[in-house]
Structure formats: structure tokens, C-alpha cells
Amino acid sequence: MFNTIAGWGWPARLLHWASAGVILFMLGLGVYMTNFVDDVYAQFGLFQTHKSWGFVAFTLGVLRIGWRLANPSPALPDGMSALERIGAKAGHLALYVLVIAMPLTGWLTATASPLQDSYGIKNMVFGLFEMPDPIVPGTQALEDLFSTMHLACGIALTALILGHAAVALRHQFVKRDGLLRRMVLGR
């Protein structure tokens, strides 16, 4: 269950892969709904879905960080240079920051929207409960600011995910040091 020096425990692996799935879905949905859907009613439904899954992404991110702080990380593979070790730590830290910043900036974009206030739109999570609305009344300037931040986080997160996947595949198929196996099988 717990992480060991040799591998990740099942909670860490479950949180990793669940987060990966939700984040990839959210990035794809974000691109799709903002660039390929012109019908405002269809777009509205997609935005509501995006908000709900954003809450899930945030929750998974908080749980991942909590689990990571409470459990030691497995040792990095032998043979990694000092620069690779620094890169691994910096890359993971950046991923954790963006996994939290991305949904927060999305939520702030929604709460800052003057349209949300004008039309009484609530930030609902799967229709089950309402998220707080700290920016009342919203302003277009704040919405634009948070929207720009959300987009920047999305671009940075996409780049980091691609780099993370490339490094994992390099460890698996070039270095053959078992790093990817530990995140899949735990050993």
C-alpha cells in the first residue's frame, strides 16, 4: 500500500493514473469546446462539464500532494546524473503546481465572469453542489486576466506532460532502468 524505496504503492499509482486521465480529458475538452463548438447552448453544457471535472482534477491533485508528502518517494534509478535528478524534482514540482493552478484559474475565470452574475449561472459540480463565488460582481477585466492565466497554465501543463511522458518512455526503452514499471506495477 505505501511507497517503498523500490516502488510506488497502489494509492500513489491510482492517484497518478486517475489524475493523468482526468487532466488529459480536461485539456482535450477545453480545446474542443473553445475552438470547435460554435453553438452557444452546446458550448454552455460543455463548460458546465468542464467545471465539474475541473473540481475532480483539483481534488485529485490535492490528494496526490497529500499522499506524496505523507509517503517517501522511491529512490531515483541508479545512473541518473545530478542534472537529471534536479530535472526530475523540478519537473514534478512544476506538475504539482500546475495541477493545482489550472483548476483554480479556471474556477476564478468562471466566478469573475460578468455574464455569470447577469444570468444567475451557478458553478455547479455535476449538479450536486454549488462551488463558492468569491468574485461578485464579476468584471470583464478580471475574467480576461484569469482566462489568460488559465490558458498559460494549460499550455505549460501540456508541455510538461509531453516532457514527462517522453522521459518516462526514455527510461523504459532506452535506459531500461525500470522507472516506468514502478509507476505501473509498483515494483
Image (cartoon, rainbow, N blue to C red):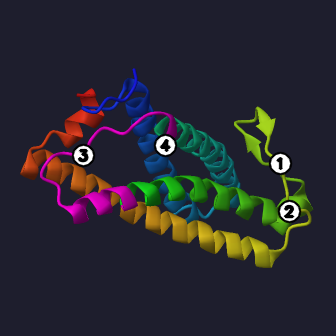
Q: Amino acid at mark 4?
A: Val
Image height of 179 relative to 110, above or below: above
Q: Amino acid at mark 1?
A: Pro
Q: Which mark is residue 76?
A: 3
The image shows residue 122 at horizontal and vertical percentages of 83, 48
Sequence order check, earlier mark of 1 and 3: 3
Q: Which mark is residue 135?
A: 2
Q: Which mark is residue 132?
A: 1
Q: What stretch of residues is rendered in magenta?
A: 69-90
Q: Is residue 84 magenta?
A: yes
Looking at the picture, tell me which residue is in the foreground, 122 or 153. 153
The span from disc 3 to disc 4 (Cα, nearest Å) is 26 Å
Task: Say if residue 35 shows up in the picture.
Answer: no
SS at mark 3 in the image: loop
Quadrant of residue 105 within the rendered picture: bottom right
The span from disc 1 to disc 3 (Cα, nearest Å) is 41 Å
SS at mark 1 in the image: loop
